Image (tube, rainbow, N blue to C red):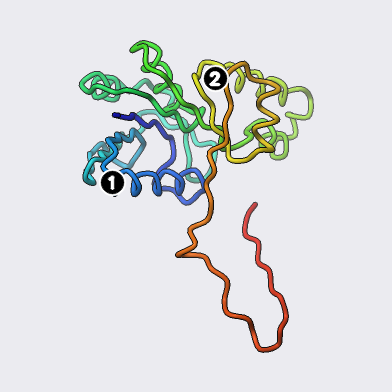
Amino acid sequence: MRIALFTDTFDETNGVARTYQYLVQYAARTGLALHVYTYGPRTCQEHYGSVTIFRKRRRVPVHYYWDLSYDIAPNLDIRREFASHHYDVVHVATPASLGLCGLRLACRAGLPTVGVFHTAVPDYLELRVRLMKRGWGRVAWRAMRWFYDQMDLVLVPSNCVARRLRSVLSVPVDVWHHGVDAGAFYPDPPREDGRVRLLYVGR
């Protein structure tokens, strides 16, 4: 199986990027044929065994976060690169510019498409943008439904999110369990004082 992955974030420090960094490591280790289309400071290719990463420079970036931006200009290089390969499935990681590009290319080629709902963008916007409380949150959810209802399958990180999306989407929703790297994160041996210490890191 040959997979084309479209993600607007890969080299940055965030949960979505880390997920796909792990996926690239897994694909290279197991021989899974994976092509990653993402952004970078310049257009180039990197090869890791069965994995190829196509980094494309943004043409007209519009920043929506300090290290993330939306490219409002179509990238013909991506279309040509995509058309020069045979794929069995398209994996769309984000509902941003590269995600939209991957969805369009998959639809034109008649390929099955898997989308991933990593972030509840409407909820996030509602917390950060005051205008969202005046109905813009509902508009954002309509846009998300339009995007994800074009997929053949939508993956989500938890059962809670799955229940929520099944109530609003008309396509199958399944859980993509991320788990924890037990080699990198493990409990220390019990301390001499017997006290229990907990640490949570997140938003």
State how far apart marks 2 and 1 are (Cα).
30 Å
Amino acid type at image mark 1: Ala
Residue at 22% x, 39% y is: 45
Residue sitting at the far right: 134
Question: Local crowd at mark 2 within 10 Å, few (<14), some, or many (≥20)?
Answer: some
The quarter holding residue 188 reads bottom right
Q: Is residue 146 left or right of residue 107?
A: right
Q: Quadrant of the N terminus?
A: top left
Question: Local crowd at mark 1 within 10 Å, few (<14), some, or many (≥20)?
Answer: some
Q: Position of residue 85 (x, y in %)?
A: 22, 23
Of residues 170 and 70, the one nearer the viewer is: 170
Mark number for residue 2? Answer: none
Q: Position of residue 144 (x, y in %)?
A: 60, 23
Q: Is residue 87 left or right of residue 168?
A: left
* Disc nearer the start of the sequence (2/1): 1
Amino acid type at image mark 2: Phe
Query: Do the CB atoms of the residues marked 2 and 1 lie less than 8 Å apart?
Result: no
Of residues 78 and 183, the one nearer the viewer is: 183
Mark number for residue 28? Answer: 1
Question: Which residue corresponds to mark 2?
Answer: 147
Residue at 69% x, 31% y is: 163
**Is residue 114 positioned above or below 118 on the image?**
above
Residue at 25% x, 18% y is: 83
Secondary structure beneath dot 1 equals helix
Of residues 193 and 42, the one nearer the viewer is: 193
Q: Position of residue 93 (x, y in %)?
A: 46, 33
Residue at 65% x, 61% y is: 200
Secondary structure beneath dot 2 equals helix
